[in-house]
Structure formats: C-alpha cells, structure tokens
Image (cartoon, rainbow, N blue to C red):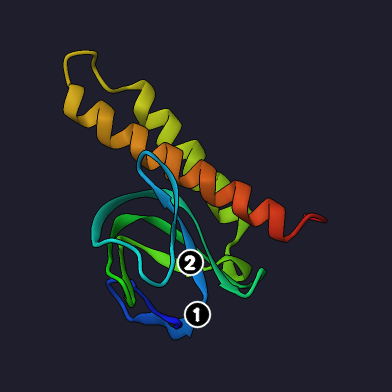
C-alpha cells in the first residue's frame, strides 16, 4: 500500500505522488512517514525531505521549516519554504548565512524571542548549505 505525499510551499505544490516512504527533518529528529503510520502532526526544522521508492531515494527537497501531517495513507508537508535540492544556490545560501550571522550578533541578550527566531533561521540556512554541498560535491 503506497503513501500519498505532498510537499506544499507558500508558492505552489512542489510534489504530489504515491511513494513508499518519505524521511523528513522533524524538530526533534528525522522521522519516516510510511504506510500505516499512526496519525501525527509534526513541526519541521530546516533540512532535507527524502522521497523513497523501495530502498532508493528518488527525490530530495529542502524545506526551511514548517509542519507535516501524517496519517496511515497520506503525508502532507506544509513548508515555510521549499525547493528541490538540485536548485539550491550554495553561493546565495552562504550570503544569506553571513547576513543572518551578522544580524544575530547585534541582537540584545534580553530579546530572547528574536534570538530564538534568528537561531532557527541560521540553522535552516546551514542545513540548506549542507544539502547543497552533498548534492553538488564539486562546488
């Protein structure tokens, strides 16, 4: 029994297909959505969603956080931002990371909420860079 997986960004539906498994970056660790999975709503951190046919990865998408809703026959990923890993620009991501790190250095110690938000954004861009480097090892 296959699993219907959808990856939806604010701009569009990036992926919709029946697959054997989807492994995604949960906020507390990676988790696999598979047929007959117990219902679960999951917060996502920045990282890669890997789509499987059998034991082979067929597609990979970078998500910059969001949520996943899993049921026995469906997994819907509502991503804050998402794109195929093959489309990540390492140079753009590195530039964004430099800006974020500079901004983070200027956040006051009292502004815990902004520190938390900035930390999550920095983690997400670092994960984006790692994903791009893994998929474009010659860059």
- Residue at 27 percent across and 53 percent down: it is 42
User: Could you tell me residue 53's position as x and y percent?
Assistant: 60, 77
Determine whether the residue tagged by mark 2 lies in a helix, strand or loop. Answer: strand
Left or right: 88, with 23 as reference point: right
Quarter placement of the N terminus: bottom left
127 up-or-down from 23: above or below: above
> What is the CA distance from the residue labelled 1 to the residue labelled 2?
7 Å
Tell which of 27 and 100 is nearer to you: 27
* Above or below, comparing residue 32 to residue 83 in the picture: above
Q: Residue furthest top?
A: 109
Q: Are marks 1 and 2 in contact (CB under 8 Å)?
A: yes
Residue 107 on image: x %, y %: 27, 22
- Residue at x 44% of width, y 38% of height: 123
- Give the crowd class for mark 1: few <14, some 14-19, many >=20 residues within 10 Å: many
Q: Is residue 106 above or below residue 33?
A: above
Residue 112 in the image, given as x and y percentages of width and height: 19, 22
In the image, 25: left or right of 80? Answer: right
User: Left of 107 or right of it: where is 81?
Assistant: right
Residue 129: image x %, image y %? 59, 48
Quadrant of the image occupied by residue 39:
bottom left
Q: What SS does tag 1 mark? A: strand
Marks counted in the figure total 2
Vertical arrangement, residue 135 with respect to residue 100, above or below:
below
Residue to which mark 2 is pinned? 22
Q: Which residue in the protein does label 1 denote?
A: 19
Farthest residue to the right: give it. 138
């Amino acid at each position: 029994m296959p699993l219907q997986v959808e990856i939806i960004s604010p701009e569009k539906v990036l992926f919709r297909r029946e697959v054997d498994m989807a492994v995604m970056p949960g906020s507390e660790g990676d988790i696999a959505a598979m047929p007959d999975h117990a219902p679960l709503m999951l917060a996502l951190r920045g990282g890669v969603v890997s789509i499987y046919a059998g034991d082979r990865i067929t597609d990979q998408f970078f998500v910059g956080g969001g949520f996943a809703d899993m049921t026995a026959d469906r997994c819907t990923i509502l991503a804050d931002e998402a794109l195929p890993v093959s489309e990540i620009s390492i140079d753009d991501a590195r530039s964004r990371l430099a800006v974020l790190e500079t901004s983070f250095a200027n956040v006051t110690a009292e502004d815990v909420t902004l520190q938390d938000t900035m930390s999550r954004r920095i983690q997400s861009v670092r994960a984006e860079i790692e994903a791009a480097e893994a998929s474009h090892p010659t860059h």
